[in-house]
Amino acid sequence: DHRDLHLSIRRQRQMCIRDRYPGATGFANDIALVSAGVVIPWSGLGEAWMYCSPEILNHKFWFIRAVRAGFQAMIEKFRLRRVQALIDSSFPVNTKWAKFLGFQHEGTLPYYGPEGETFYRYVLFTGLRS
């Protein structure tokens, strides 16, 4: 029956989203402080992303512990060999954060942003094999 087919398709789509776009959001007092995750275009590769509220500065230690633990869990669960991130060069604190997580500078992308901004590509090689 078509309802079973619809449920099956929806379940497959949810699994695809969960397995290819894992992420999490951290809250304090019902305020979203950070959303972060990894897009997995193919097995072994992750594109890291993160959005933070200015409120995160009031929760630095929680933020550091939560992001490091969550990030490591995603690397292990999805057996990521390489994780990369694009960072807008106009926010130097983000490059410090990437280095703190173990990323290294791989390259500079001049005029990459939508308004001609320069971005940096940072990469983390995890040592895992698929």
Image (cartoon, rainbow, N blue to C red):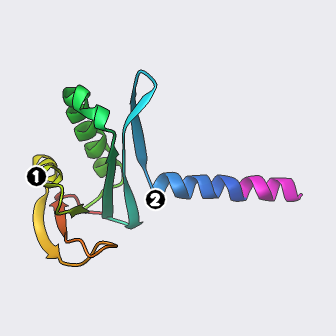
In the rendered view, would you say 58 is above or below 126?
above
Pinpoint residue 3: horizontal percent, then vertical percent: 85, 53
Is residue 84 something one can see in this rendering? Answer: no
Type of residue at label 1? Lys
Pinpoint residue 25: horizontal percent, then vertical percent: 41, 38
Examine the image and state in which quarter residue 122 appears.
bottom left
Pinpoint residue 7: horizontal percent, then vertical percent: 75, 52
- Residue at the outermost right position: 1
Say whether residue 80 is magenta: no
The residue positioned 31% from the left and 73% from the top of the image is 115
Q: Label for residue 99?
A: 1
Q: Which one is earlier in the sequence, the residue at label 1 or at label 2? A: 2
Q: In which quarter of the image is the N terminus?
A: bottom right
The residue positioned 54% from the left and 58% from the top of the image is 16
Left or right of 28? Residue 18 is right
Q: Nearer the viewer, residue 80 or 52?
A: 52
| Helix, strand or loop at mark 2 | helix
Q: Give the range drawn in magenta.
A: 1-8
Q: Main secondary structure of the magenta part?
A: helix
Alpha carbon of mark 1 to alpha carbon of mark 2: how far?
Answer: 25 Å
Type of residue at label 2? Arg
The residue positioned 34% from the left and 73% from the top of the image is 114
Q: Look at mark 2 in the image and give the residue it sits on.
A: 20
Examine the image and state in which quarter residue 124 appears.
bottom left
Q: Nearer the viewer, residue 117 or 2?
A: 117
